[in-house]
Image: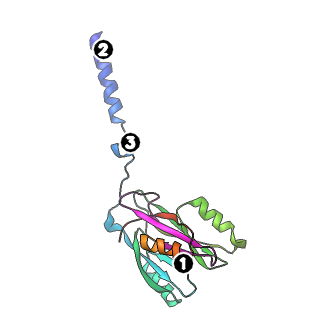
Amino acid sequence: MKFCLFIFATLFLASSTTNARPAWTETGHAKCPTPSSSVPFSRLFNNIEDYLLTPNAVEQSRAVKHGYESDGLVARAFRTKQLSTVPLYHVLVGKTHANFYTTRKHERDVALRGGARNNVDLGIAAYVFPKRLCGGKPLYRLLNRSTGEYFYTTDEGERKFAVSDQGYDAPKIAGFVLKQ
């Protein structure tokens, strides 16, 4: 009888350990993509105070041909889905031609319903982290209500200046990106 209990207990313990979850899911740690798979995430600016973000060199060249100028590298992001990343949706706001970015599908859908149906879904701009993971830092989205334009930055100094001196509202976080 004791031998049967021993066998039963051994089988029970063995089966429960084979179904155990990996430690990273239980502790909440993210599996991080290889940083070398990230690409430069550039910010461009045009004369109507519109900011465009792109990890795509072809899109960047096309934008320059249409009057945009490079405003530097904002951070690093991913062109394709990677571990722990989510889409950064891109909506063109029809009334102001502002570029709106968000990781929240619902927020994208609300933006598409607004603007007297002139807003355009431009798909996925990049893949980023939904929260502070893998060394990610916030990509701030600031709105200037008087112009309807959005400004995007990862730089604290730029963020503070945009709010204090440029008329932008307190920032929201569009997503989290890798440092430059």
Instruction: Look at mark 3 in the image and give the residue it sits on.
Output: 26
Residue 155 can be seen, yes or no: no
The reply to whether dot 3 and dot 2 touch (C-beta < 8 Å) is: no
Which label is found at residue 90?
Answer: none
Q: Position of residue 148 (x, y in %)?
A: 62, 76
Which stretch is magenta?
127-152
What whole-number distance in Å separates the C-alpha atoms at marks 3 and 1? Answer: 44 Å
Whether residue 3 appears in magenta in the rendering, the answer is: no
What whole-number distance in Å separates the C-alpha atoms at marks 3 and 2? Answer: 33 Å
Q: Residue furthest left?
A: 3
Q: Crowding at label 3, few (<14), some or many (≥20) Cα neighbours within 10 Å?
A: few
Q: Earlier in the sequence, mark 3 or mark 1?
A: 3
What whole-number distance in Å separates the C-alpha atoms at marks 2 and 1? Answer: 77 Å
Judged by depth in the image, the label closer to the viewer, 3 or 2, is: 3
**In the picture, which quadrant includes the N terminus?**
top left
Q: Amino acid at mark 1?
A: Gln
Instruction: Look at mark 1 in the image and give the residue it sits on.
Output: 166
- Residue displayed at 36% across by 37% down: 20
Q: How many marks?
A: 3
Element marked by disc 3: helix
Closest to the observer, 48 or 158: 158
- Residue displayed at 47% across by 71% down: 160
Instruction: Look at mark 2 in the image and give the residue it sits on.
Output: 4
Element marked by disc 2: helix
The reply to whether dot 2 and dot 1 touch (C-beta < 8 Å) is: no
Residue 3 can be seen, yes or no: yes
Element marked by disc 1: loop
- Residue displayed at 52% across by 72% down: 163
Q: Amino acid at mark 2?
A: Cys
